[in-house]
Image: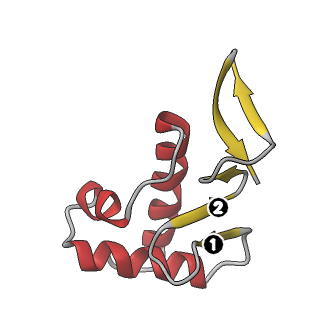
């Protein structure tokens, strides 16, 4: 995936996964979606998380998405309901 555009695609994939599944994808899901080896998926996830000023972060000392605004991967007191469906947590 050459160029800076790849981070936009990774961001979009993560948002789409949160909406569809109610939770964040693993870096291996990112790799699979873009036909990349798992290590490259992990590298791209870290690159996105470290090179943006958006309120997104990984669980400390892991490669797992903790929060990806407006979604949070852990249960919080803040629920998001869309069309009567409540399967997301907010930051």
Question: Where is residue 71 drawn, in percent x and y?
Answer: 67, 50
Name the residue tied to disc 2: 67
What is the CA distance from the residue labelled 2 to the residue labelled 1?
5 Å
Query: Considering depth in this image, is 29 or 7 the residue closer to the camera?
Result: 29
Residue 39 quadrant: bottom left
Question: Where is residue 47 drawn, in percent x and y?
Answer: 49, 82
Q: Secondary structure at mark 2?
A: strand
Query: Considering depth in this image, is 54 or 91 the residue closer to the camera?
Result: 91
On the picture, is 68 further left or further right than 54? left
Please report the residue visible at 52 percent of the width from the left and 84 percent of the height from the top: 61
The C terminus lies in quadrant:
bottom right
On the picture, is 20 further left or further right than 74? left
Question: Where is residue 46 drawn, in percent x and y?
Answer: 48, 80
Q: Earlier in the sequence, mark 2 or mark 1?
A: 1
On the picture, is 22 further left or further right than 43? right
Q: Badge 2 local density, few (<14 within 10 Å), some, or many (20+)?
A: many
The N terminus lies in quadrant:
bottom left
Name the residue tied to disc 1: 57
Query: Considering depth in this image, is 35 or 24 the residue closer to the camera?
Result: 24
On the picture, is 76 further left or further right than 64? right
In the depicted structure, whether residue 47 falls above or below residue 11: below
Residue 19 quadrant: top right
Marks 2,1: beta carbons within 8 A = yes
Q: Secondary structure at mark 1?
A: strand
Give me the disc on residue 14: none
């Amino acid at each position: 995936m050459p160029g800076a555009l790849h981070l936009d695609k990774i961001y979009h994939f993560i948002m789409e996964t949160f909406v569809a599944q109610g939770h964040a994808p693993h870096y291996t899901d990112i790799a699979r979606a873009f036909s990349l080896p798992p290590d490259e998926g992990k590298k791209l996830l870290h690159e996105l998380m470290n090179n943006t000023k958006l309120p997104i972060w990984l669980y400390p000392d892991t490669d797992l998405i903790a929060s990806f605004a407006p979604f949070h991967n852990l249960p919080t007191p803040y629920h998001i309901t869309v069309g009567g469906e409540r399967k997301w947590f907010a930051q």
